[in-house]
């Protein structure tokens, strides 16, 4: 009888939540107020991280900016302060270094307070064939793109759980849902980030019954220096995404407490196809969409913060 009762309850919940999701596709969700929230953004010194900082600054949030590139981070700080009477705190932090993450996190707690919205945005990419990727860059991809999420969440999640208030945001990638040519290290590290964020979302909701929210973002390639030289075969289906467009979509998803955000919308259909087609059909689809050649002209430009991190690593 327990199985019958459990099934009936499940079907009732399934129908209710299905209808709820349909309604919210037509009627936008109510957006929460982030004024006064302490928002920490990793990788805030440029690109998507900087644009997200601008959005939160415009809505009265207290900003905590982390980046290994101190010059870029201070420029983001300056731009954010131009938005008005905004409290902005900039910290140099190498997210690949666990001890440094914990040290700077303690500094933030002491100087600013408990972080209530954590955006794990920092990322690195090599864009090389698997056998051409240096071992230290494989390690760095996982340290920055995935393991740093464990450390930042361990540092700031306890206070969120205690207050029963907070929001965890994971910037993963479509490459974290579908393996991509010449991105073996990046793709696998983004798979790890997605898996961690989803597992933590379920743990918070099922085990702890917490009101701490989660948003997991999986965009296609964004037109930033990080993916300089990347190409797309059919821009109407899989366009290279404009930074400001992606930042606005992510900001809205956070305000509406949306759990999953895939950009562009064609990605939802592509992920569905992945589950039902054969491997050979998957390869054919990848070739059709140009996923097999999208990274061929990738310039592999090493950013200044990566060079700085490597120099610091050698000194240790």
Image (cartoon, grey):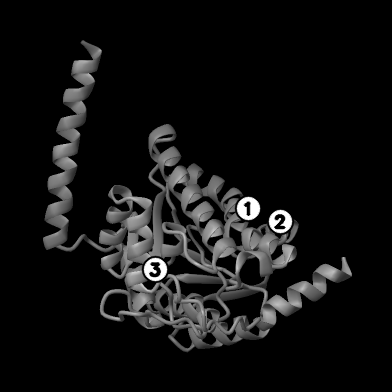
Q: Nearer the viewer, residue 106 or 235?
A: 235
Quarter of the image for residue 288 reads bottom left
The vertical placement of 284 against 86, above or below, is: above
Crowd rating for badge 3 (residues with CA inside 10 Å; few <14, some 14–19, many 20+): many
- Residue located at (24% from left, 16% from top): 3
Q: Is residue 268 left or right of residue 111?
A: left
Quarter placement of the N terminus: top left
Residue matched to label 3: 219
Residue at 33% across / 50% down in the picture?
278
- Residue appearing at x 66%, y 79% in the figure: 69
- Whether 50 is drawn above or below 23: the answer is below
Disc 1 crowd rating (10 Å Cα; few below 14, some 14-19, many 20+) is: many
Residue found farthest to the front: 280
- Quadrant in the picture for the C terminus: bottom right
* Mark 1 → mark 3, Cα distance in angstroms: 23 Å
Q: Secondary structure at mark 1?
A: helix
* Position of residue 41 in the picture relative to residue 308 (left or right): left
Out of 31 and 225, give the one closest to the viewer.
Answer: 225
Chain-order first, disc 3 or disc 2: 2
Q: Spatial distance from mark 2 to mark 1, Cα to Cα?
A: 6 Å
Tell me the crowding category of disc 2: few under 14, some 14 to 19, or many 20 or more residues within 10 angstroms, Cα based.
some
Name the residue tied to disc 2: 98
Q: Are marks 2 and 1 in contact (CB under 8 Å)?
A: yes
Q: Position of residue 49 (x, y in %)?
A: 50, 75
At numbered mark 2, what does the secondary structure look like: helix, strand or loop?
A: helix
Q: Position of residue 41 (x, y in %)?
A: 53, 68
Residue at numbered disc 1 = 151
Per the image, label 3 sits on a secondary structure element best described as strand
Q: Name the front one of labels 3 and 2.
A: 3
**Number of numbered tags placed on the structure image:** 3
Q: Is residue 202 visible?
A: yes
What is the distance, in whole Å, between disc 3 and disc 2 at their CAs?
A: 26 Å
């Amino acid at each position: 009888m327990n199985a019958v009762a459990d099934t009936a309850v499940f079907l009732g919940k399934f129908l209710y939540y299905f209808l709820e999701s349909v309604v919210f596709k037509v009627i936008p969700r109510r957006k929460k107020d982030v004024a006064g929230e302490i928002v920490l953004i990793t990788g805030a010194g440029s690109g998507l991280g900087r644009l997200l900082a601008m959005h939160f600054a415009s809505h009265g949030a207290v900003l905590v900016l982390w980046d290994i590139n101190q010059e870029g981070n201070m420029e983001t700080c300056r731009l954010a302060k131009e938005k008005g009477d905004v409290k902005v705190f900039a910290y140099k932090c190498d997210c690949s270094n666990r001890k440094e993450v914990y040290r700077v996190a303690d500094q933030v707690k002491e100087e600013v307070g408990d972080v209530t919205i954590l955006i794990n945005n920092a990322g690195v990419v090599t864009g090389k064939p698997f056998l051409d990727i240096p071992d230290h860059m494989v390690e760095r991809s996982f340290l920055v793109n995935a393991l740093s999420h464990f450390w930042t969440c361990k540092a700031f999640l306890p206070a969120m759980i205690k207050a029963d208030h907070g929001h965890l945001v994971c910037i993963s990638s479509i490459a974290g849902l579908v393996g991509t040519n010449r991105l073996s290290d990046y793709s696998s590290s983004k798979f790890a980030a997605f898996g961690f964020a989803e597992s933590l979302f379920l743990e918070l909701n099922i085990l702890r019954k917490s009101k701490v929210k989660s948003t997991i973002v999986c965009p296609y390639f964004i037109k930033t220096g990080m993916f300089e030289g990347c190409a797309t075969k059919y821009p109407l289906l899989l366009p290279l995404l404009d930074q400001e467009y992606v930042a606005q979509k992510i900001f809205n998803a956070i305000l509406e407490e949306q759990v999953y955000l895939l950009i562009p919308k064609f990605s939802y259909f592509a992920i569905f196809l992945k589950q039902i087609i054969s491997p050979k059909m998957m390869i054919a689809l990848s070739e059709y969409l140009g996923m097999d050649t999208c990274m061929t002209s990738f310039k592999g430009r090493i950013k200044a913060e990566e060079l700085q991190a490597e120099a610091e690593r050698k000194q240790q």
